[in-house]
């Protein structure tokens, strides 16, 4: 197979049968993103970060009974953000969706969170967090198109020296299969090569989707310095915190075990877009989803290519999330556009 190009939107919703919705709270400086399949679909997950926060991910392992999910969500808010899943679940139940148990339906809504509690927003929300309502609002907003950057789960995201954000891409293969990626980039490390404007994901860029700058002509001396959000001295408080959470998807018919392998392989995309990645203080996680619309003629070699393209698509999505971030009051870091456009 070969890569034909991006899908028409260059978003994960180019994968047939998927929609995405976003909601955010400007005062709290946080948000939630939901991925909604048109019908229940197969999914799995791989967790490679050392500090994950998750909801109902164990059932996505290949040996577990439940074979399909009704939705997935990504959210800010650290452990508080897991409540977004309850809002999404309740709304889906009202819509008549969910795993049927007698007369009852229980929507299956796994999700993951990132830590954005120290990003300058007002987190004094009192007895009730905003995340249940953000989950409901994100589900109500689902559609085929959506903005990138400071939106949804990426609204309050940061990297080591720039504002992070929500990114997405799609890739169409010559056999007709589409692979998409969706990511909330909130890494402990950097998405750019040292202090340059160039993205680590540059080798995989398509159609100048994050500026078309390639790699620096000369690699900066500090390119491989391990620059993170950690405080400079023991005992000092870190300004903000971490975790990059993502979803990769395809319309190819894949089993739960095959999707597990896609999720594992897709983590290479984080390693190629962020330096460092998968640290003890990141909860880096990738879900993998199949909408099951297209049979593979050559299952094993086709799966191999889907794994590779899931990784490259995710690298590109990380860079797009950072590239499209917008400034908001009290940001701890500048956006990529503020730092590099016109300079």
Image (cartoon, helix red, strand yellow):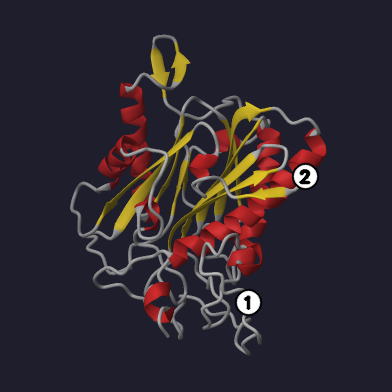
The numbered dot on residue 215 is 1
Note whether 68 is above or below 192 in the view shown: above
Which quadrant would the C terminus be assigned to in this image?
bottom left
Answer with the quarter of the image where residue 103 lies: top left
Q: Is residue 278 visible?
A: yes
The numbered dot on residue 1 is 2
Specify whether 117 is left or right of 232.
left
Note whether 316 is above or below 332 in the view shown: above
Q: Position of residue 260 (x, y in %)?
A: 66, 41
Q: Dots 2 and 1: beta carbons under 8 Å? A: no
Nearer the observer, 341 or 102: 341
**Secondary element at tag 2:** loop
Q: Residue furthest left?
A: 126
Between the C-alphas of marks 2 and 1, the distance is: 27 Å
**Mark found first going from the N terminus, 2 or 1:** 2
Q: Position of residue 124 (x, y in %)?
A: 20, 59
Q: Position of residue 293 (x, y in %)?
A: 61, 27
Q: Pointer 1: residues within 10 angstroms few (<14), some, or many (20+)? A: some
Q: Position of residue 92 (x, y in %)?
A: 36, 27
């Amino acid at each position: 197979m070969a890569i034909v190009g991006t899908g028409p939107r260059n978003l994960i919703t180019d994968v047939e049968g998927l929609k995405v919705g976003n909601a955010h709270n400007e005062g709290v400086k946080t948000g939630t993103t939901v991925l909604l399949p048109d019908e229940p679909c197969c999914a799995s997950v791989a967790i490679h970060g050392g500090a994950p926060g998750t909801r109902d991910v164990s059932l996505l392992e290949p040996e577990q009974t439940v074979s399909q999910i009704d939705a997935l969500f990504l959210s800010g808010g650290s452990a508080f953000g897991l409540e977004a899943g309850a809002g999404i679940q309740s709304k889906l139940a009202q819509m008549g969706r969910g795993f049927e148990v007698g007369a009852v339906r229980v929507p299956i809504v796994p999700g993951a969170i990132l830590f954005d509690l120290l990003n300058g927003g007002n987190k004094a929300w009192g007895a009730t967090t905003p995340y249940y309502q953000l989950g409901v609002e994100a589900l109500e907003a689902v559609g085929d198109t959506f903005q990138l950057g400071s939106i949804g789960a990426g609204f309050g995201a940061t990297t080591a020296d720039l504002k992070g954000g929500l990114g997405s891409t799609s890739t169409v293969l010559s056999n007709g299969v589409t692979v998409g990626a969706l990511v909330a980039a909130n890494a402990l490390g950097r998405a750019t090569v040292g202090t340059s404007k160039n993205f680590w994901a540059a080798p995989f860029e398509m159609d100048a989707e994050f500026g078309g700058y390639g790699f620096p002509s000369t690699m900066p001396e500090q390119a491989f310095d391990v620059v993170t959000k950690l405080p400079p001295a023991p005992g000092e408080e870190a300004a903000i915190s971490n975790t990059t959470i993502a979803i990769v998807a395809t319309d190819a018919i894949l089993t739960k075990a095959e999707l597990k392998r896609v999720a594992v392989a897709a983590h290479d995309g984080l390693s190629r877009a962020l330096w460092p990645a998968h640290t003890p203080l990141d909860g880096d996680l990738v879900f993998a989803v199949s909408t099951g619309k297209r049979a593979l003629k050559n299952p094993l070699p086709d799966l191999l290519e889907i794994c590779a393209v899931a990784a490259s698509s995710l690298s590109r999505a990380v860079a797009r999330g950072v590239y499209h971030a917008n400034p908001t009051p009290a940001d701890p870091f500048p956006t990529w556009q503020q730092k590099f456009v016109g300079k």
